[in-house]
Amino acid sequence: MVHNITLIPGDGIGPEVTDAARRTLEATGVKFNWDIVSAGSIAMKETGTPLPSEVLESIKKNKVALKGPVTTPIGTGFRSVNVALRQRLNLYACLRPCKSYRGVPSRYQDIDLVVVRENTEGLYSGIEFERGTEEAMKLIDLLAVTLGIQVKMDSGISLKPISESGSRNIVKFAFEHARKNGRKKVSAIHKANIMKFSDGLFLSTAREVAKEYPDIEFEDVIVDALCMRLVRSPEQYDVLVLPNLYGDIISDLCAGLVGGLGMAPGANIGEEIAIFEPTHGSAPKYTGQNKTNPMATILSGMLMLRHIGEAEAANKLEQAIAEVVVEGTSVTYDLKFGTGGTPVGTSQVADAIIEKMETS
Ligand code: NAD
């Protein structure tokens, strides 16, 4: 069977890491028909928009995509292509497994936890009011008149809507993932003591959903306490389910537990469509240098293989990655951290993984 997959190389280091992932995926023996489409700053230059309609059409047709990171200009410029893709395709669940591989330099060993991040609402909804605009003034007036709340006139405002239905979907996703993958505990992360109506709704919904899964332990943890406990004793966590912004931040923290962003894969999943991409961004300073670690993207490809029913190929690929990491000779600079060894480049990591699969 040939799998039709949309491939979005992205920008910055995206084209290099997705090329490495594509080569290793093809070397598993699985057949792909790649539909390569451009998004981000490269698409912006070519077509005048960072998210051309053909990207959305291709993903809707193929249902599965592998994506490299895409730069989002800070402060001004176009809005995030990543957020737009997640919202427009309703990819409400972001799944980010964080797993230790032996040989990766890290303060922690044997980490195996999963971050499940709500992907479409909360502070990423894009409902923002720029300081000094008519809309911002109207909102500030409305708050003063209806609630008696005084907001400084020179404020910029971002809204954080969290819905019961969105919370239900993401918490159910986390429990279903736990059940299917033999995991024991789901922790719902929030700041409901302060944000009573947004995080509070997320938490009360999570408590309700948890009752439908008596076989899986449930707890809730306040996000700041979670940060401290994750650094102190990460082994006490299994599946974490979080609203959007906390999920984004905690994903990077968890990536740090397993050796950094170079080892952190991810998937954005909806009812019908899934986009697989690393947790890391486009690392612009390393563009075109054949330097950064492609493993996060290759591991995202491994998750994609499982998603499309190619479990055997996924196991073979993961085994080859694990062997290359433990040998430690064909790894990039980030996996040489503190060891003094000479790193190899992005494409050489892919070569080494392919060679392992060919000789296994
Ligand atoms: P980043 O993840 O791109 O890079 C931060 C640092 O992490 C890099 O400088 C590098 O030292 C390290 N790093 C990242 N990926 C690595 C890899 N594969 N191997 C080795 N080291 C790696 O984060 P940033 O600098 O905050 O973001 C850069 C751009 O990427 C921004 O425009 C941001 O909006 C965007 N971004 C995109 C996505 C996405 O496309 N899904 C995700 C996060 C950030």
Image (cartoon, rainbow, N blue to C red):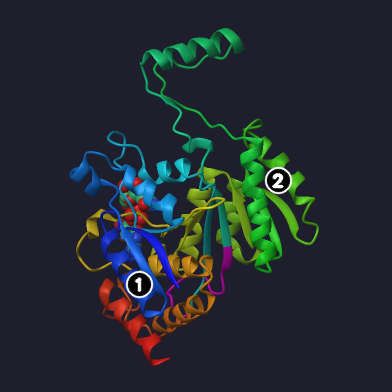
**Mark identifier at residue 206:** 2
Dot 2: few (<14), some (14–19), or many (≥20) neighbours within 10 Å?
many
Residue position for label 1: 337
Residue 39 place in picture, x, y as percent: 30, 49
Residue most toward the top? 145
Residue 34 vs 226, above or below: the answer is below
Residue 189 place in picture, x, y as percent: 63, 48
Dominant secondary structure (helix, strand or loop) of the stretch shown in magenta: loop
Q: Secondary structure at mark 1?
A: loop
Which of the two labelled residues, at mark 2 and mark 1, occupies the earlier sequence position? 2
Residue 218 vs 345, above or below: the answer is above
Left or right, 156 with respect to 177, comes to: left
Residue most toward the front? 1
Q: Quadrant of the N terminus?
A: bottom left
**Mark identifier at residue 221:** none
Q: Which residues are magenta?
A: 102-113
Residue 59 vs 325, above or below: the answer is above
Residue most toward the bottom? 359
Asked whether residue 340 is in view, the answer is no
Please tell me which residue is depicted at 52% across the width and 65% down the height of the picture: 307
Magenta-span inclusion, residue 267: no
Asked whether residue 121 is in view, the answer is yes
The span from disc 2 to disc 1 (Cα, nearest Å) is: 39 Å
Dot 1: few (<14), some (14–19), or many (≥20) neighbours within 10 Å?
some
Q: Secondary structure at mark 2?
A: helix
> Does the numbered disc 1 mark a residue whose Cβ is under 8 Å from ligand 1?
no
Q: Quadrant of residue 279?
A: bottom left
In this view, the residue in front, 65 or 76, is: 65
What amino acid is labelled 1 in the image?
Phe
